[in-house]
């Protein structure tokens, strides 16, 4: 009895994150069902489903936002994977982070840079899934 | 005896912000010359001049970054003007801000929303310069 | 053709904020319909409607959150009005802000303190609506 | 020759955190005595000892504050333990964190959610002390 | 019946801020006595009274801290006045703010720069008190 | 074909951080050459090379800034090492962090305190390089 918004949201998450999407939502749901539900319905069902911005741009503006926030490197790492999955290149990811130096200073930007490198490294020695994601770029 | 980086940076600022660019830099320079100089040379001369990201994307990732930071509405307002000048539409500006609700919550996003509206209002009743900027969209 | 969530959310907003609720949502809607809609549906329709925390506690934990964030004094001011409307006393509002010194330091807490005083002052010389809100405490 | 405020503060910390209180203060003191002293005297001796807010409410407004700050997960984890010790339920802890999505966005709230789960897990497989704390809820 | 810490703290505040000190504390006290009391006793009575750092250094590290925080320009403005009063020069104030670009980016540093200029302007056209403060540099 | 600013910047970094400087820049460069280059040229080549503030003061105002930011403990840790290298004492490092409680609250200051202790511990059991750095204080 999932809502229409939930179904639409999950579809979008899967399109953007691949198999990671279900694993992530299952993990959140096992802690709090309401958190898991709104995590799918609100950003993905309500916001990302709108056509005014294309999915790639939506990911890019999210990468810069999480870079300047500085304290959510785990989420940044998930969104970097999602961005690569959608066709943002590694070079573009690094360029977004580098531009943010001007808006958040070196410490936060440096954390984001190391996070990006960790994602790239994980992919390079990674499982078939990761190689697939990489291959799309 | 301005550096090459300064000249390149000022050109880029003018291309992006129009006459606002010189006014802004003059204002900063009258307080601190070193601040004014690095403000032109570092983000514009060093970073924005690189071709990996196009100018429109660079502005969009800046709008999301300033939205989630929440405390620099004056700078956000300047970058919204710059974004419109580069061809980002009002609808896209509002969509970027709306997406950021998911990453910074309603209070910071609401501040950004009101800031965008104030820029639009200023332009609508605005001077010739502002109408020109608007006309490009 | 408003969603059930929207109706439930608007009812809750009105119960918490009085006539301010419709004015606020109309203002947001006039800038961006999607922002206005999710502002009602998500926090009020989805989250505040749950019974695990009572409305007074929900407002109190919001006051502390906005105090430590420091950069959303307009939203803090609206939530202080909402808190008073729900029966949180002025003394409790000030005590919440004072406790936050330990978690965000004096500068952010001082901004919140002045914001609370401005709300109280506005109410004391205020319109009938404001006196009504105050009378409930 | 501890001050009255220190004694009163230590008593309150012990009442709220159990044996964790002395361990924590000893750890801080071994690095900096002044830091350890004001940590007991200021929030606990000066602020928490006031009766305007009950201890449970004081903990709840602290959980929301640390959730939106986003960068102090270790302290958040200690305050979640303290909250459970004072009778806040796990369900209430998760609900506070979930409500904060609306004020700080998903990344910071997600960090807090995982932190809460880690505290619960530690307690479930935990030592006698932890089971005791848990038993009180 | 003020505590020793309060007396010591008020003395230090007066030494650092001049007549502004009493006005500021009176203003806070009229809103919340506990906030006013801890504002004097904790930073000034407990921390600033220690000799490990000299008063000028204490002010300088506060200016950089408030610059990077970005959302407390009123408090930053008060501390700039205090810094000038203690012999920090205008040039040093601007240099501290300029260095912070590297740690917080341009938006927050620019807000601080304009705040400093506003303080300088206020002093230049200012009352006798302000001229006195200025004269000490 | 490194720029003058780069050479000047690297010299300053080495003077301040010792052998750590080259390792750090090499690590950044291996991820992104532009990031590594501006990291040397901008803060070190442009800002730190100016004589208005002495190097020790420049490090102290950086320590307070990173303490209140709260989310860049790795960078804070590098700057603490740099500060000790330049003659700031351990006692002064701890005093700066302790003063920041008043501006950022206990959670962020506590993170900085534990970070400082970790640096001291690493140095005490450390390699010859670290002992050398320590010996200079």
Image (spheres, coloured by chain):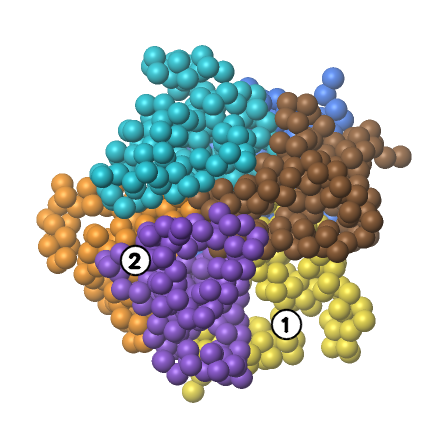
Chain colours: A orange, B purple, C yellow, D blue, E brown, F cyan
State the mark number for residue C79: none
Q: Quadrant for the C terminus of chain B, please.
A: bottom left
Task: Give the labeled residue for mark 1.
Answer: C17
Q: Position of residue A80 (x, y in %)?
A: 27, 53
At a point 49% along the width and 42% down the height, the residue shown is E99
At a point 52% along the width and 39% down the height, the residue shown is F65
The outermost residue toward the front is: B1
Task: Give the labeled residue for mark 2.
Answer: B49
At a point 17% along the width and 46% down the height, the residue shown is A123
Q: Position of residue C36 (x, y in %)?
A: 48, 76
Residue C9 as seen in the image, left or right of residue D39:
left
Q: CA distance from mark 1 to mark 2?
A: 49 Å
Say whether marks 1 and 2 touch (CB < 8 Å).
no
In this view, A63 is above or below F57: below
The outermost residue toward the bottom is: C1
Tag 1's secondary structure?
helix
Total tally of numbered discs in the picture: 2
Tag 2's secondary structure?
loop
In this view, A119 is above or below E15: below
């Amino acid at each position: 009895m999932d809502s229409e918004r939930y179904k639409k949201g999950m579809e979008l998450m899967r399109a953007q994150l691949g198999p990671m999407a279900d694993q992530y939502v299952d993990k959140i749901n096992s802690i709090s069902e309401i958190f898991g539900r709104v995590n799918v319905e609100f950003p993905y069902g309500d916001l990302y489903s709108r056509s005014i911005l294309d999915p790639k741009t939506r990911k890019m503006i999210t990468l810069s936002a999480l870079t300047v926030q500085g304290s959510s490197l785990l989420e940044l790492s998930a969104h970097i994977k999602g961005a690569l999955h959608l066709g943002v290149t590694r070079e573009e990811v690094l360029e977004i982070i580098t531009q943010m130096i001007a808006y958040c200073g070196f410490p936060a930007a440096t954390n984001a840079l190391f996070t990006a490198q960790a994602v790239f490294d994980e992919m390079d020695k990674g499982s078939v899934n990761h190689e697939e994601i990489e291959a799309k770029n």
